[in-house]
Structure formats: C-alpha cells, structure tokens
C-alpha cells in the first residue's frame, strides 16, 4: 500500500487554518516528502507522523514557501538522533540552496546527499519504487513528480516446476533478481506471470497547464495539482504569475484520465475552496478540494 498525506494546502504564506503546500508519502518502510515550506514539521506533528524516518525530500522549486521549512526540519531530525543519510532531490541549484539554508543548521549527525535534476524528464530508481521528475512552467525552474510503485506478475509455480528450477531460487526470482547458476541464467520472467497494475501518484504545483503534466499524469491513481485560484475572473492573474485556476486543473485531469484529483496550493485570498467545486466537477467529477491532513491509502488492484 502507498499512504499519501497532504500536510499543507496553502500557497505563498501560511494561514491559521492552512499550512504551506507539502505532501508526504509512505511505502514499504520508506518516507518521501515533497516540498518543505514554513510550518511543514508542525503540520506533520498535527498528523501524528514523524520526520525522523524521512528518506527523501523532493523540491519542486526554490521559492520560500516551498523550501523555508528545511532548516528546522533538519534540526528536528538531528535532535531525534537520526544517523541515516538523507537524500534531497531538486532542480539545478539544490546544493547551493541547501548550503545557504544550513548556515542556521550547520551540525547534523547524518549526511545529506543532494541530487540535482538536469533534464526535462529524469527517473530515479529505488528499491520497489521510482520517482519521476518532469519540467513544468513556472517563473523559475520547476518540476512535478511521480511516485510510481510497479507490481510484478504473480509467481507461477507450474512454470518453475516445468523448467526444473530449484526451489532455493524461487524467492529471489520473485523479488526480481537475476541469478547465475552452473546450468545457466535464471530470470524473473521464467517464474512470473504478466506484470500487474501498480500505483502512481502525480504531484505538481506552481505551474501553468503543460503537455508534460498530461503526459506524466497519464492514468495516475491520484493527481495532486495546484489550484491557486478558484474564481474564474482570476485567470488573467494566473497567467501573469504562472499559476493555475481550478478549471484549468480539471481540464488537465480529464485529459490525463486520472482516477482522482486533489487540488492544493490555494491563494491566501481563497477562503472557501469548496464554493468553486461544482464547476470543477462538471469538467472532472472525481475532483476534491484538498485540506490539510487529507490522507488516502492506495492499495493494489486484485488480479
């Protein structure tokens, strides 16, 4: 299963009832945070989730409402006696930004590794899942992210027996390992059925609508998308500042044929997002106005 939580849904500045935009994902013992604006760790505490086990932090871009919470987050991790390395992923300039922020968090009991994204699309593979970064269109370099959990086919005992594959190799082959033996090479496809549908979450904020979003969000189980402005008369402002309206986000969700869309990154002037959702759902029925702490547990489809 893949747990997803919107820790905060606000853009530009935190409000008493809305923290700045960030999202946390948990899968198979790994924790991934996307963006870390001011107050992110408070939002995490309110949810009851701990920052200590975070393995990866991804940044969409380096505006303050997406990165200013990092020094405090690092200090909290250090005070929790964390020793495991932390991987940070973000656009070009990540190392410079992190080093500048670490002036107020200089001594940490764990190492920080910075991975800078240099291509329009880039994939980083991990054990059991991958993160896909894709360029979007803001007034600074900005990326969206996919978290993708692939699912191998079912183990086919009959195939293993027919080919005389020793039982001592079955478990390793099930886990995707290729094995060299005295009698030749054993590969996972020799004992597995067809690949099954996995899980995919797309997260994108601070951007105009782009073809890259439609392409990368294609058939996502959950599409978390910026909705800076709910008011239709603010489209001109959205274009000027390279943000998005609710209706524009709905059009993207429809084109990408996602299962569900959560809106996030609301303007501070947008008090009641739900007031504008009828028009959004007329375009894309499975749309939700995100709220701080909103959580879902995504599970694999049964074959």
Image: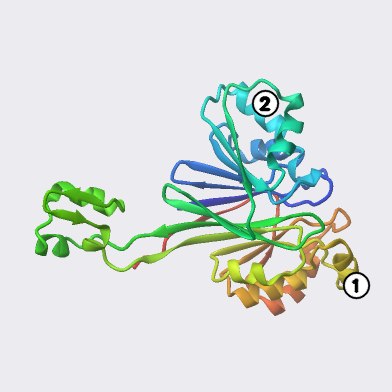
**At 42% across and 47% down in the image, what residue appears?**
127
At numbered mark 1, what does the secondary structure look like: helix, strand or loop?
Answer: helix
Relative image position of residue 181 (x, y in whole percent): 16, 49
Q: Given contact means CB atoms under 8 Å apart, are the residues at marks 1 and 2 in contact?
A: no
Tell which of 199 and 118 is nearer to you.
118
Query: Which numbered tag is attached to residue 5?
Result: none
Q: How is the image coloured?
A: rainbow
Residue 292 visible in the shown view: yes
Determine which residue is flagged by label 2.
Answer: 75
Which of discs 1 and 2 lies nearer the camera? The answer is: 2
Give the residue number, with chain letter if any, for mark 1: 233
Q: Secondary structure at mark 2?
A: helix
* Res. 58 in view: no
Image quarter of residue 262:
bottom right
Crowding around mark 1 (Cα neighbors within 10 Å: few <14, some 14 to 19, many 20+) is few
Alpha-carbon span between mark 1 and mark 2 = 43 Å
Residue 236 in the image: above or below residue 269: below
Q: Is residue 271 above or below residue 215?
A: above
Query: Would you say 116 lies left or right of 140 here?
Result: left
Residue at (70%, 72%) from the top-left corner?
A: 250
| Image spot of residue 152 (x, y percent) | 34, 60
Residue 139 x/y as whole percent: 82, 58
Picture quarter containing residue 105? top right
Mark earlier in primary sequence (1, 2) = 2
Q: Who is closer to the viewer here, 3 or 218?
A: 218
């Amino acid at each position: 299963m893949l747990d997803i939580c919107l820790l905060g849904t606000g853009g530009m500045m935190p409000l008493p009832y809305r923290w700045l935009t960030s999202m946390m994902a948990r899968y198979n013992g790994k924790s991934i945070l996307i963006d870390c604006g001011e107050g992110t760790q408070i939002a995490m505490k309110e949810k009851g989730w701990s920052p200590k086990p975070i393995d990866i932090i991804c940044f969409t871009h380096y505006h303050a409402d997406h990165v200013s919470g990092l020094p405090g987050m690092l200090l909290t991790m250090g005070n929790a006696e964390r020793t495991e390395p932390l991987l940070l992923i973000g656009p070009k300039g990540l190392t410079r930004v992190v080093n500048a922020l670490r002036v107020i968090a200089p001594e940490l009991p764990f190492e920080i590794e910075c991975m800078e994204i240099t291509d329009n699309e880039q994939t980083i593979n991990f054990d059991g899942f991958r993160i896909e970064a894709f360029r979007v269109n803001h007034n600074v370099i900005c990326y969206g992210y996919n978290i993708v959990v692939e699912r191998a086919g079912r183990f086919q005992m009959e195939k293993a027996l027919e080919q005389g594959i020793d039982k001592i190799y079955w478990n390793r082959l099930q886990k995707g390992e290729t094995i060299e033996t005295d009698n030749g090479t054993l590969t996972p496809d020799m004992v597995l059925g067809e690949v099954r549908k996995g899980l995919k979450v797309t997260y994108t904020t601070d951007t105009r609508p782009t073809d890259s979003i439609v392409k990368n969000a294609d058939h996502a189980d959950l599409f978390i998308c910026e909705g800076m402005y709910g008011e239709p008369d603010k489209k001109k402002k959205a274009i000027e500042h390279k943000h998005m309206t609710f209706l524009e986000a709905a059009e993207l969700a429809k084109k990408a044929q996602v299962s569900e869309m959560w809106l996030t990154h609301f303007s501070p002037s947008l008090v009641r997002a739900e007031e504008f959702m009828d028009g959004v759902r007329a375009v894309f029925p499975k749309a939700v106005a995100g709220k701080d702490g909103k959580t879902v547990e995504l599970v694999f489809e049964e074959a």
